[in-house]
Image (cartoon, rainbow, N blue to C red):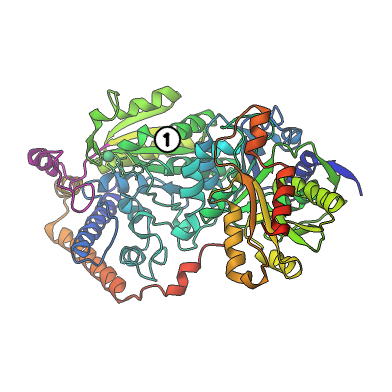
Amino acid sequence: MSLPKDLLLSMYERMVLIRAFEEACVQLYMEKEIRGSFHPCVGQEATAVGACFAINPDDYMTCTYRGHGACIAKGIDVNAAMAEMLGRKTGISKGKGGSMHWTDPSIGLLGENAIVAAGVPIAAGAALSAQMDRNGRVALTIFGDGAINQGAFHEALNMAQLWKLPLILLCENNLYAEMTPLAKSNPLAQVADRAKGYNMRAMVVDGNDVCAVYEAVREAARLARAGEGPTFIEARTYRLLGHMIGDSESYRTKEEVAAWRERDPIKRLRAHLAQAEGVSEAEFDAIHARVSRQIEAAVKFAKESPYPDPEEAYTDFWI
Amino acid sequence: MRELTYTQALREALTEEMERDPSIILLGEDIGAYGGVFRVTEGLLAKFGPERVRDTPISEAGFIGMGVGLAMTGKRPVPELMFMDFALVAADSIWNQAAKMRAMSGGRVKVPMVIRTQQGGGRGNGAQHSQSFEALFTHIPGFKVVLPATPADAKGLLKSALRDENPVMFIEHKLLYNTKGPVPDGEYTIPLGVADVKREGRDLTIVSYSRQLLFALEAAETLQKEHGISAEVIDLRCTVPMDIETIVRSLRKTHRLLITHEAHASCGVGAEIAMRVMETAFDELDAPIMRVAGLDVPIHVSKTLEEVVLPQPAAIVRGALRLMNGK
Ligand SMILES: Cc1ncc(C[n+]2csc(CCOP(=O)(O)OP(=O)(O)O)c2C)c(N)n1
Ligand SMILES: [Mg+2]
């Protein structure tokens, strides 16, 4: 890990913020403050932060229902995000989108998506837009290992390579698609091999190493901006919680989860910062305290926000 | 007034709007070098170049999904679905993505995308290349739905569609491309969601759109000549927004309504029109509403069978006579 200490510290703080956000949401879900779908990204914070810190604020992004980490890493307003979770009028989508549809064009966020792989062609379209405008922007699309078996994914990869679009395809390979293990859903030796059929450049990185993800995405972005076309990045990671709240997790062993807890990306970065950069316990405490205050404030903001008025069912639709 | 084919009128609309608005880009299969299998985009590649007239692989879900991304980032994509039937291949991009983005984002994004396609039977293309899906687009909220019947309407409505901020499904008919009609010189547009009285009459109102409108006009002529019945023929032109007002205005005069469309009868647009008329103008009706629509079976190839499945002018005449005679 050879990145500047300041960058590492801000990545650390953002990862802690994502973890705290998700843990607060688990709590709020239990309290029935959050309804519907919620897919925590706990354990996958390094892919989100490494990727989003490696691109520019005006670069485009699509991600998935498990995309809170990516959206927070890209810079979404945490209060508005929390209010959205609680279905409030002050939410990022005024309570109309919920957990799986955070969208904020002001930070290039063209939406999470509740349909597996649907964000991939949308990001390819944004990449085409950037290519036509010659504005130097790239599009990042983050998706799971399950998405590589969807038709839309294949169609988008084919066109992205054909037209050399400035697109970064980041697969968060967390070994499971819902309850199905990777080996039961495709015959590949590794996920990144999917890119071969499209003659597309591919890399495999440790998705729990924020620096490895950062460097891979930064290189992919550099190539994309230089007109070198798309890159497929497989980031190997693990979700430490179930697919959704209430998942029995019968498809994996406690030992497997425990082993991955040892590779927790936040723990790893903390150890590195302590050992290599000499960050003190007091400094870590200050970061965690700041994040706690931010999340408490977000929850308070969300809970105190009004629900949308019934008339708003008809608004924000037709122009 | 000069005469143009439906194809020429569409091409003029695309050309004029692409000249006016550089953000409009066309995407689709064989639309560029070949000029489109229905020739609508002929010559546009030479005029606007390969970036704005982009030949795509056979990837409807992919390039309509890309259209959503293009639209969200400031472009006006016009993906072409070679046949409406292929909408089912791209259904997610169309209905889960394009149709919902704006609402799901609380109005933070817009998707000004016009999907151009052609639909309908009458040419023996069979069950997977002849379907009419306007009801699907009318049922699932999110798209404006346009079905022009004449060259003049095709041009004016397409120009409006290309200026609309919402997703628009622009539905042409494969048997209208070679039809000719007067098209005004110079700049004009026709607003979306305004029906047009194509023939005035006193005794009954016939509502239709797209190619079936021509059948309705033919039937109206027969009714007048052979039965002394004066039919008013309304071209709905758009099913979203749906102009019920123009229909009700006509019913205040005729008090009898016949709806005819090529699409399958069940849960078709006709059912929706009838319901809306019931809700708003039941008292104007002197007879039950009559529907003449496609049979609820797949569309067969053989001419003798296809003509049974798709309602012909004679069926409209029969329906009108039943409506007038009250049995
Ligand atoms: C097209 C589609 N099919 C099925 C689902 C239901 N579903 C939601 S998440 C999911 C698993 C996706 O797994 P993966 O892509 O690996 O992402 P992860 O949840 O592991 O982040 C499935 C099947 C869906 N949302 N969309
Ligand atoms: Mg997965």
Q: In the rendered view of the protein, which quadrant contains the C terminus of chain B? A: bottom right
Horizontal and vertical percent position of residue A280: 14, 56
Q: Is residue B42 magenta?
A: no
B299 left or right of A249 in image: right
Prevailing secondary structure class for the magenta stretch in the rendered image: loop
Which type of secondary structure does the marked residue at label 1 adopt? helix
Dividing the image into four quarters, tell me where ligand 1 lies.
top left
Identify the residue at the far right of this view.
B1
| Residue A180 percent location from the top left of the image | 23, 36
Quarter of the rendering containing residue B194: bottom right
Number of marks present in the image shown: 1
> What residue lies at 33% left-to-right and 57% top-to-bottom?
A99
Callout 1: CB less than 8 Å from ligand 1:
no
Q: Is residue A233 visible?
A: yes
- Rendering coords of residue B114 (x, y %): 62, 48
Residue extending farthest left: A255
Q: What residue type is labelled 1?
A: Phe
Span of residues in magenta = A236-264
**x and y, in percent, of residue A259 in the image:** 10, 39
| Residue identified by numbered label 1 | A153
Query: Is residue A237 within the magenta segment?
Result: yes
Depth check, front residue: B157 or A294: B157
